[in-house]
Image (tube, rainbow, N blue to C red):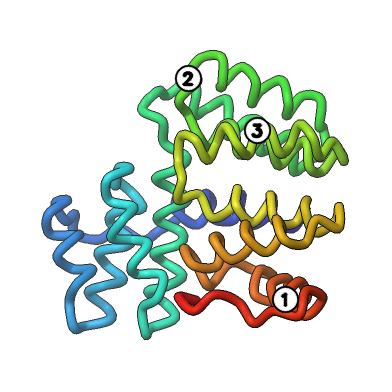
């Protein structure tokens, strides 16, 4: 349930961000490349409000920023972008499902996510959220299927990759767990628990990890 609380905290924080001068998309992306950490953070905050999927590539780069605040804001922005499908009703259904999941109303959560998927089959985050619900219910087979659907639509989804890694680790399929966890870590080295999980899996396999990580 900790993963769900993080999702809800992210959306709540976005809603309460202090007012500031609006940056254009071009200005926000340029700010991400600034030598000034405060300006990089401003760019990430603006993209959290109005960024779209093409902007995620720049935000993924910011996940390795030297400044911790910038890294946090970049990850927050990525989740915010992923929660926007372009369809207000589908987005509302996913938010409703998240509320149900936080309240441990798992049947209602699954229903909301399924309705969002039916409305927008291309909405990767709806698939990912339903995968999370199935994971919490212990239905790992269905969770993996939904993670796969999410990754087909959003190959950079480090949350779905980490989820797959966690399931395969629980199933003692350590080689596959290592692959998914390394891919998640390569995209976002800040994901909670992934670095520790990687260390444990590598230790059990007697491996040190891939060179690019």
The CA distance from mark 2 to mark 3 is 14 Å
Q: Could you classify mark 2 by the number of other residues whose Cα lies within 10 Å: few (under 14), some (14-19), or many (20 or more)?
A: some
Q: Which mark is residue 123?
A: none
Nearest the eye: 182 or 125: 182
Foreground mark, 3 or 1?
1
At 52% from the left and 27% from the top, the residue drawn is: 92
Task: Report if the CB atoms under discs 2 and 3 are less than 8 Å apart.
Answer: no
- Residue 157 in percent (x, y) is at 50, 49
Pointer 3: what residue? 146
Pointer 2: what residue? 120
Foreground mark, 2 or 3?
3
The CA distance from mark 2 to mark 1 is 38 Å
* 202 relative to 165, above or below: below
At 64% from the left and 26% from the top, the residue drawn is: 113
In the rendered image, which quarter is residue 131 located in?
top right
Foreground mark, 2 or 1?
1
* 54 relative to 65, above or below: above
Asked which secondary structure carries label 2, the reply is loop
At 82% from the left and 43% from the top, the residue drawn is: 136
Asked which secondary structure carries label 1, the reply is helix
At 66% from the left and 68% from the top, the residue drawn is: 194
Task: Report if the CB atoms under discs 3 and 1 are less than 8 Å apart.
Answer: no
Q: Could you classify mark 1 by the number of other residues whose Cα lies within 10 Å: few (under 14), some (14-19), or many (20 or more)?
A: some
* 174 relative to 68, above or below: above
Pointer 1: what residue? 202
Going from the N terminus, do you reach mark 2 or mark 1 first?
A: 2
């Amino acid at each position: 349930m900790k993963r769900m609380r993080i999702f809800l905290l992210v959306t709540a924080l976005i809603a309460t961000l202090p007012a500031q001068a609006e940056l254009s998309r071009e200005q926000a992306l340029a700010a991400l490349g600034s030598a000034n950490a405060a300006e990089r953070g401003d760019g990430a905050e603006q993209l959290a409000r109005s960024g779209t999927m093409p902007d995620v590539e720049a935000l993924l780069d910011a996940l390795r920023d030297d400044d911790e605040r910038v890294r946090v804001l970049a990850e927050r922005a990525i989740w915010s972008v992923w929660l926007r499908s372009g369809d207000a009703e589908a987005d509302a259904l996913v938010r409703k499902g998240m509320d149900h999941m936080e309240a441990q109303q798992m049947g209602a959560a699954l229903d909301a996510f399924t309705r969002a998927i039916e409305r927008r089959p291309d909405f990767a985050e709806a698939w990912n959220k339903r995968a999370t619900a199935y994971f919490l219910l212990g239905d790992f087979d269905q969770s993996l299927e939904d993670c796969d659907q999410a990754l087909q639509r959003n190959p950079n989804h480090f949350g779905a990759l980490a989820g797959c890694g966690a399931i395969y680790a629980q199933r003692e399929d350590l080689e596959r767990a290592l692959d998914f966890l390394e891919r998640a870590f390569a995209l976002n080295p800040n994901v909670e628990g992934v670095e520790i999980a990687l260390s444990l899996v590598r230790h059990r396999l007697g491996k040190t990890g891939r060179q690019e990580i």
